[in-house]
Image (tube, coloured by chain):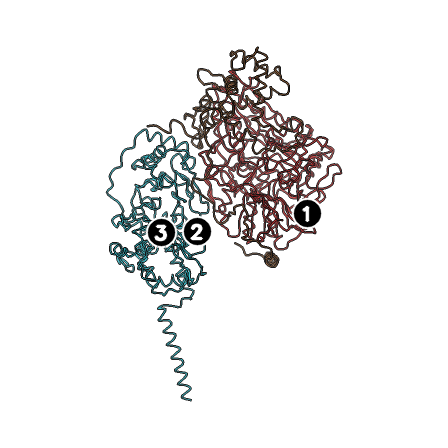
Amino acid sequence: MRRILQSRTLACAALLSALTACCAHAGSPDMQEFTQIERGRYLSILSDCAGCHTVPGGRPFSGGRAIETPFGNIVSPNVTPDLETGIGAWSDDQFDAAVRKGIGRTGAHLYPAMPYTAYTRLSRDDVMAIRAYLSSLEPVRSSRNANTLPFPFNIRSAMIVWNALYFTAGDYKPDPTKSAEWNRGKFIVDGPAHCGACHTPKTLLGGDRTDQYLQGANLQGWSAPDITNSRRTGLGSWTAEDVALYLKTGHNRTSAATGPMAEAVELSTSRMRDEDTKAIATYLKSLPGKTDEAAPAQVDANVMAAGGAIYRDQCSACHGIEGKGVPHLFPALAESTMVRSNDPTTAIRIVLRGARSVGTKAEPTAPGMPSYGWQLDDGQIAAVLSYVRNSWGGASAPIDAKDVTRVRSDTALRND
Amino acid sequence: MKQATLATIALRRREFLAGTAMLLFSATTVKAATIAGRLPWAPNAGSPPPPIKVGPWEFFNGDEGRAIEALVDCIIPPDPETPGGKDAGCAVFIDRQLAGPYGRQEGLYVRPPFQAGAKNQGHQSASGPAQDYREGLAAFDRACRQRSGGKPFAELSGDDRIAVLKAVEKGELKLDGVDLKSFFTQLVKDAQMGFFADPIYGGNRDMVAWKMIGYPGARYNYLDWVNRHNERFPLPPVGMTGNAQWTRS
Amino acid sequence: MPRRLPRKDVVIVGFGWTGAIIANELTDEGLEVIAFERGPWRDAPTDFPPGYMQDELRYRIRHELFLRPDQLTFTFRNTMGQTALPIRSWGAFMPPNGVGGGGVHWNAEMWRFLPSDFVLKTHLTERYGAAFLPPDMTIQDWGITYDELEPHYDRFEYLCGTSGTAGNLRGKIMDGGNPFEGPRSRPYPTPAQAQPFSHTLFGKAARELGYKPFPQPSGNLSQAYTNPLGLRMGPCTYCGFCEWFGCGNYSKATPQTTILPHLIRKSNFSLRDNSEVVRINVDRSGKRATGVTFVDSSGEEWEQQADLVILSAYTMFNVQLLLHSQIGQPYDPVTNTGVVGRNYTHQTISSVNGFFDNKKFNFNPFIGSGSIGMCIDEFNGDNFDHGPHGFVGGGYVGQVQTGGRPIESTLVPPGTPAWGAEWKKAVKDNYLSTVKPGTGVHGSFYAYRDIYLDLDPVYKDRFGRPLMRITMDLKDNEIKQNKFLTDKFAEIIKAMGAEKLAVQYRTAPYDITTYQTTHLNGGAIMGSDPKTSVLNKYLQSWDVPNLFVMGASAFPQNAGYNPTLTVGALAYWSAAAIRNQYLKNPGRLVDA
């Protein structure tokens, strides 16, 4: 009798220790558990993984999307659980190293097109949750083409130097002097949502210019605007509600998301919880931004006259004679920081090529703007934009025809 | 989205049972776009009108061109304030229209059999505007020479030209086989059309016709003028490719 | 041999207003819906931009947004004794093409029919006696009442953000609105549009003559609006390029602005453009539709099977498809049997142009919208005693000038030469001071035994199918009606202060060459008797219960109003019957 009890106890103990070992190996709750997967799904939305790892209209997370960098195109890998072409066979440590340290499975460095410099602020638990979510997806058999970075950028070991300059690893450390909401906002902005990847300008080597944090940058043929609280070029004239609504629906009473931001809204910010978009708004509105701006150059009276004529005859059809637009339909140019940006690339390109703003469940209209590149020459586009920037109380440097020529040729071969 | 009703579930079940055997997904695809999920968009979308090429006649030969220029200048004579049909480009307008899809009657139903019918049953011949002009101008030229002792229309004096056209209009100038009166009616219509169309099409050069009548052109926003009754609208006309105000330096 | 595509629950043929309305309703039921449109996809900002939409030559004279006759046309004759000849180039009407259909290029004039219009036969017979009606007039009651349709009128008006002033609010007559309209359950969603000078002047003159003028109800909005689907629209900017043109700034109610952005997001909806349905297929019993056969842009045939077929291809193409698919008995006017093709109608249109002293009047005619105008309804329907006049029917009249596009709006007073120096001077002197209402007199067109549609024996389309044949003329009743209305209209134009009038009556014979309107109706009419109608009151085919036919083809006769609001309301009414009754129990909804 005692022997049976002993062996049962031994068996239980063995089972228990096996279970513990299993859990210890995972390091965290069961990978297949619903809350874990849900948490990971939400984190992947905050991180906009689909933005790079899903080809639009393609199989989710199967990679193959070309990501444009100043150094060439990098093609995103397949992160579905496929064993051969995806990450199904990766260990948790390998996955975590890729996401938070920029180190691939073979030990080779990843390019910061994978924003590990931002994702480092996630915790290991966060990353494991993402892993759990990805592991729940349909495995897709799809291997990507080789990277197309030219020499010398294709030498990955050069990343060691780059990382030394620009990469500081480490979880997000909350600021105890600030509110929980502010910290949540900073965590999201600097971490999973990696807003700085587009909105912080870069050095020649592609690292962040931290002195101009979130003050706007030029990439992929667009200019991402200043999202600090600066009055003229940033979010200074928006309330926190305006910011949150813009993130949630892609539209607010003065502006509409288009281009790459339309996709970020569609895949990421419109699916965030209200408290998170509110937190992001609170954080961004706390950043003072530029304060020492020189007065802009005067606009030539003839340019204002020509621009005003074009505006009246064409643009006012939608944007209104007073530049007020129609809330949630036509952006209010009179209040548009996009139009007043120091880098007018986006405003110019929208006039040249047209634009479609994002459609979301809350704002399905997705109004579009026609292209004027066929009708207006470079001087005329420069004139009308200079007019818009300097009307209705605005004062920003005029646009030169050369700027328009540059954007026209830069965008000629683009697909978006 | 509401849940499907029982009936639709029944419908779907039939679909499942009956539908699978005869499907041909990928062998060849339907050549028609399927639009689903989002509104389509492409950069530089749209189809702006191509401007006419300034230069030699594309449809008329030299003699025809001279005749048409003289004709449009009679239909719309020059005066001190506004150019006539010729300087306004009406002949160019007609030329380019006839050289294009309109002249070729593209898109019209041109299948036989061709039978004569009542006037209110519409045009019933295989010939389109291009052919009508060619034949009409030739017949007009012959009739004109007959009447004026060998001179083509373009060489007649101003008064003589008007006399000829009035005779055509009354049906007094005829030629076998060609209805000169209806040719002239069409010509008047086309000349005046070219006079008032957007300058991009060759006529209404510098928007002279629009300036004459006080039409402000291709504008889109009069919200601030709807309630201003009985006041003259002050802005100059603008065409689809702008006006002088758009470029001031 | 056409190849088959994966089966769907619902196939919609033709994607204009009714196609879009039905698609939105049925996708809300969770059904898999596919729509086919013969023409191209059309998108407001890119296809109708303010950069080049204001092109009168391209879009009005050469009518680029419309169907090409070579793609499909009809033959026409006035009487049965004549040979019908092809309409080689459009004239009297202009069929739409492309996603959005007529809803893209329409003026957005949004009129409800009168309660008496729906029970016309009964009403007129009761009031005037059967002998008062011409013996060959074949008007019928619709099989539904205004009260049944009212909630659906309301729904379509609110979908579109209609701008207007209510005239009859739940039985109470309201100042400033149309005192003759049927009762409406709530006010218009947006206020009436502002009226330019000449339109305001007409209203003043009409009022002084004792009439009750009111602003035309407009689907060109007076202010920004968000419709029940969450779609945003902007205010109309009075560009004067409405009918014939698409709207570039989201201010005209169209399927593009009021339905499509919401509909396209649904995963159970898809649309194929450039696909022409050539036949509705029925099974061997002839009582059940199995789907449609369509041709893609390369000319290849495909079959789309579905359990429910909605035919929403516009009046003419609805009737033509029924004839080609051999659904329902074709109408024979000689024996007065059959139903498909009977009660075909148009609209009785005319106008009066007024020439004013240019030193006193500057109308800025180029400021306009599609549905602008002050109108009076005293002479519509049976709003007045017809006894002394010897005709039935009527219409609204109004200064409804939509713009001053110069190719068509450079009129000269009667007696002026058509060309030359005098002409030029007269154009210059009159452009800004001329009133040109366009469809100023907008009268009813009742049905007759020998005005109908059938298949032509000679002419064929590009697929080798017979063209549909129109036999249509203008009858004494409509001629009398038009003279009466036009004379009344002329009085008001004169009272505005016109120095000269050019009065244009609508006279026989019916002319296929000059534009009237594209309000073609009938041919597949609704009713309560399958011997004299193609559809029951729910627009369901009497012969094929899983086929519903939307559109003005259902009108037993045309009233004195633009048809689209009633077309849309009927689509909502039919959709409600499909959702609440048919889907639960597919089969005949009404016993014959």
Quarter where residue A302 is shown: top left
Nearest to the observer: residue B16 or residue C351: B16
Chain seen in red: C
Same chain letter for marks 2 and 1 = no
Q: Position of residue A398 (x, y in %)?
A: 30, 35
Mark 3 vs mark 1: give the one in front.
3
The hue used for chain B is brown
Specify the label residue A381 is tagged with. Answer: none
Name the amino acid, label 3. Answer: Thr
Name the residue that disc number 2 marks: A56
Local crowd size for mark 2, using a 10 Å CA cut-off: few (<14), some (14–19), many (≥20): few
Q: Nearer the viewer, residue A111 or C237?
A: A111
Quadrant position of residue A87: bottom left
**Disc 3 marks which residue?**
A148
**Where is A399 relative to A180, above or below?**
above
Q: Quadrant of residue B130?
A: top right
**Foreground of the two, C223 or A301:** A301
Task: Label 1: state its secondary structure.
Answer: loop
Q: Which callout, 2 or 3, points at the residue further toward the start of the chain? A: 2
Give the tally of numbered discs: 3
Quick one: which chain is cyan? A
Between the residue at mark 3 and the residue at mark 1, the CA separation in whole angstroms equals 65 Å
